[in-house]
Amino acid sequence: MAGFEVSLQALRTARRFLLGMVFLYVWIGEKDGPVPRAVNPLLRVGLYVVAVSVIGTTLWLRRRELKRAQDSLTRQPGDVLALRRWRAIQLLVLVCFLAVPLYGLVLRFQGATLAQALPFYMVGTVLLFFLPLHEVKRDERDAPSLGGSSKKRS
């Protein structure tokens, strides 16, 4: 399963890159953001609701679609299309989680303070850093045969 290992390494690299983007968002918000001023509370609540719904939807999609892709890869470990589907779903999940810190940056550019935008940055960082990439579980059919069970009858 060399293709799987290459895909997993590419996803780990993408995860590191996306984590770097979160820190870039914080830096841009502090460097180029406007002077803090009162932000419409409705905007803050709206962004919180959108962030929670994106997280919930992404976790649901992740569980549902990755199970399908993993089942397909378990049945046919060499299937390139199933591997591409698995990798695309993993990448889509990571990018959806990157949207949460982006909401913090939007809030920051609307005049919020760093303390008000920090929950978005922190939740996005936690989701990107601590949520594991789903690996394909190999079952007994993929294990090499240890021989002895197939005897020829004469």
Image (cartoon, rainbow, N blue to C red):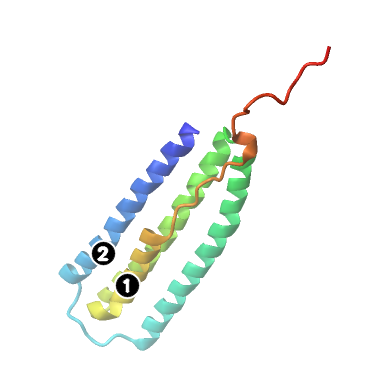
Structural distance between the alpha carbons of marks 1 and 2: 8 Å
- The residue depicted at 42 percent of the width and 37 percent of the height is 6
Name the foreground residue: 31 vs 144.
144
Query: Which badge, 1 or 2, comes first in the chain's sequence?
Result: 2
- The residue depicted at 51 percent of the width and 41 percent of the height is 84
User: Element under label 1?
Assistant: helix
Q: How many marks?
A: 2
In the figure, is residue 41 to the left or right of 138?
left
In this rendering, the answer to whether 28 lies above or below 109 is above
Q: Position of residue 49 (x, y in %)?
A: 46, 78
Name the foreground residue: 148 vs 58.
148
Q: Position of residue 117 (x, y in %)?
A: 29, 76
Q: Which residue is mark 1?
A: 104
Categorize mark 2 by other alpha carbons within 10 Å: few (<14), some (14-19), many (20+).
Answer: some
Amino acid under label 1? Gly
Q: Which disc is residue 25 wearing?
A: 2
Instruction: Determine contact: label 1, label 2, CB under 8 Å.
Output: yes
Q: Position of residue 30 (x, y in %)?
A: 18, 71
Amino acid under label 2? Tyr
